[in-house]
Image (tube, rainbow, N blue to C red):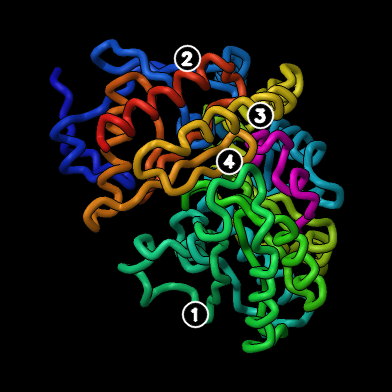
Amino acid sequence: MSLELEPFWMPFTHNRMFKKSPRLIERGEGMYYQTSDGHSVLDAISGLWCSNAGHRHPKIVQAVKDQLDELDFTAPFQSGHPKAFMLAEAIKEVSPVGLNHVFLTSSGSEACDTALKIALAYHHSTGEVQRTRFVGREKGYHGVGFGGISVGGIDANKKAFKASLLPGTLHLPHTHNLSKMAFSKGQPVWGDHLADNLEALVDANGSETIAGVIVEPMQGSAGVIVPPLGYLKKLRSICDAHQILLIFDEVITGFGRLGEWFAADRFGVIPDMIIFAKGVTSGVVPLGGVIVRDSIYNEIMVGPSHLVEFFHGYTNSGHPLACAAGISAINVYESEGLLAKSRKLEIELEEAIHSLRDEAHVVDIRNIGMAAAIEFETRNNQTSMRAMEIFQYCFDHGVMVRYTGDIIAIGPALVCDETEIEVIIETIRSAIRAVA
């Protein structure tokens, strides 16, 4: 039977262009994909920042197979299954101090909307019902639910839906400044003062109206924008001063991407909630969630015990297959020392990617953990054209990267090695020269 491409409306894809010349992946193992025409492609972006233990890790795959022999599904409302509680405990054990309660979802988008609703429910319980505003950040990405795009700051994701977004949402300026930060290795030394814009928003709108501030510790979808030294600590301090909840969206940064379980650990800043997804199962089964500070959970748990405390949830909250995959993935990260390995690989990746600094049209290179990006000059006012051509060249020559605007981003799995990093960088170098 021939493969019909037209019925599938692909997400975040130029469908008409893709279907004229499709890139079809049929198999994956470790660091590599295999295309439908038999070519091997080195995955330099961990699927989509999610396959942190590589593709089809045998222990995670076996855990899912075993779970199918035991239980495929049970409703999460008013009943439960053991692995949901086991996974929540495993996540709690690797979470920052004081964040001990886990609400499970199926994706990062669901998790973001869940975190926003938890914040509103918390303030409602404390009697501060006027706290209904949220503060996001320019260039921020928090999924594609109406809550997520409301607090998000990527204009293309919002323009068709602006009339229906959450009212009163505010946005901090982003921290991307080429004149001050270009070619930084790790955290830029300039820019902590940009957090003071939160104080200005509080002064202008009243702290008593703001429920929470949500930021990605490292902005991934915008092209690996690394926070300036001291910036996140300032946000935490300002939130504390005004009783505003601080939410970290760690869908990309969680579970080893920055060499720690969470970016909160890497940067030494503990938020009130952490949103996670992607790497929690190494991408094997969709799973997301929110890790919540004890004081928030305990406040929402007040009232008669026979009533539902928080009117929210999903059919697949804590799906058995996802929980089995999550428990196994966390065990793999621990038993195989993948976080420690990623900290060593970070040094190799940093040195390798910054060797591209003098290539044509490169205006910035930035990196932290197992994440890095190269930004290019826009060609003839055609945004994305140069990066798209580099992406296509790399794929055709056996390396999968990601492009967004005029930026090429990479985020190899934590099982990567030095030789594979070299292949990735040298393929990108050849691509830059080929399309220059």
Q: Is residue 103 left or right of residue 173?
A: right
Instruction: Identify the disc placed on residue 347.
Output: 3
**Amino acid, disc 2:** Glu
| Residue at image mark 4 | 367
Residue 320 lies in what quarter of the image?
top right
Disc 3 versus disc 1: nearer the observer: 3
**Amino acid, disc 4:** Asn
Q: Nearer the viewer, residue 114 or 236?
A: 236
Q: Residue at image x 47%, y 52%?
A: 222
| Residue at image mark 2 | 29
| Residue at image mark 1 | 167
Q: Residue at image x 68%, y 67%?
A: 119
Which of the two discs, 3 and 2, labels the residue nearer the N terminus? 2
**Amino acid, disc 1:** Pro
Inter-mark Cα distance, 3 to 1: 44 Å
Magenta part of the chain: 253-272
**Amino acid, disc 3:** Ile
